[in-house]
């Protein structure tokens, strides 16, 4: 099974600050191998959160990536990436924004 990967602008902006090219590839590939492995974040419309270690920092001081996996379309949408020291958990406002993005993605797919 070949999984397609799509990204948002905010994800691209933030992930480039957190991981080098090879480390980013490894992290995204690890998620693509088993996208159902990480927990769903409540009240986000099915978005999952994975932890990753940053260069020379480890997982505890690492980062988080939020992604939507659409099984039927075999597609992962990487939505958000952030360093753990920037925020521990998503705020209600963050979750609301994520739900809005998920809704837009689903509407766009429905129009294809």
Image (spheres, rainbow, N blue to C red):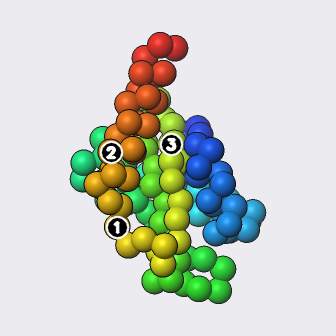
Image x and y of residue 18, in percent: 64, 69
Tell me where residue 58 sits by quadrant: bottom right
First along the sequence among labels 1 and 3? 3
Residue highlighted by disc 2: 96
Residue highlighted by disc 1: 89
Circles 1, 3 touching at the beta carbon (< 8 Å)? no
Tell me where residue 54 sits by quadrant: bottom right
Q: Disc 1 and disc 3: Cα gap in Å?
A: 21 Å
Q: Badge 1: few (under 14), some or many (20 or more) residues near its Cα, within 10 Å?
A: few
Q: Which of marks 3 and 2 is in front?
A: 2
Q: Which of 9 and 65 is in front in this view?
A: 9
Q: Which residue lies furthest to the right in this view?
A: 21
Q: Is the residue 52 above or below the residue 93 in the image? A: below
Helix or strand or loop: what does disc 1 sit on? loop
Image x and y of residue 103, in percent: 37, 30
Please tell me which residue is depicted at 46% across the width and 30% down the height of the picture. Answer: 105
Residue highlighted by disc 3: 76
First along the sequence among labels 3 and 2? 3
Helix or strand or loop: what does disc 3 sit on? strand
Q: Is the residue 69 above or below the residue 28 in the image? A: above
């Amino acid at each position: 099974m070949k999984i397609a990967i799509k990204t948002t602008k905010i994800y691209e902006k933030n992930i480039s600050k957190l991981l080098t090219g090879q480390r980013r590839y490894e992290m995204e590939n690890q998620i693509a191998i088993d996208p159902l492995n990480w927990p769903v974040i409540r009240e986000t419309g099915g978005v999952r959160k994975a932890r990753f270690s940053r260069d020379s920092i480890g997982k505890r001081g690492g980062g988080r990536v939020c992604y939507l996996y659409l099984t039927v379309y075999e597609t992962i949408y990487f939505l958000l990436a952030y360093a753990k020291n920037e925020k521990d958990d998503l705020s209600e406002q963050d979750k609301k924004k994520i739900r809005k993005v998920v809704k837009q993605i689903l509407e766009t797919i429905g129009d294809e």
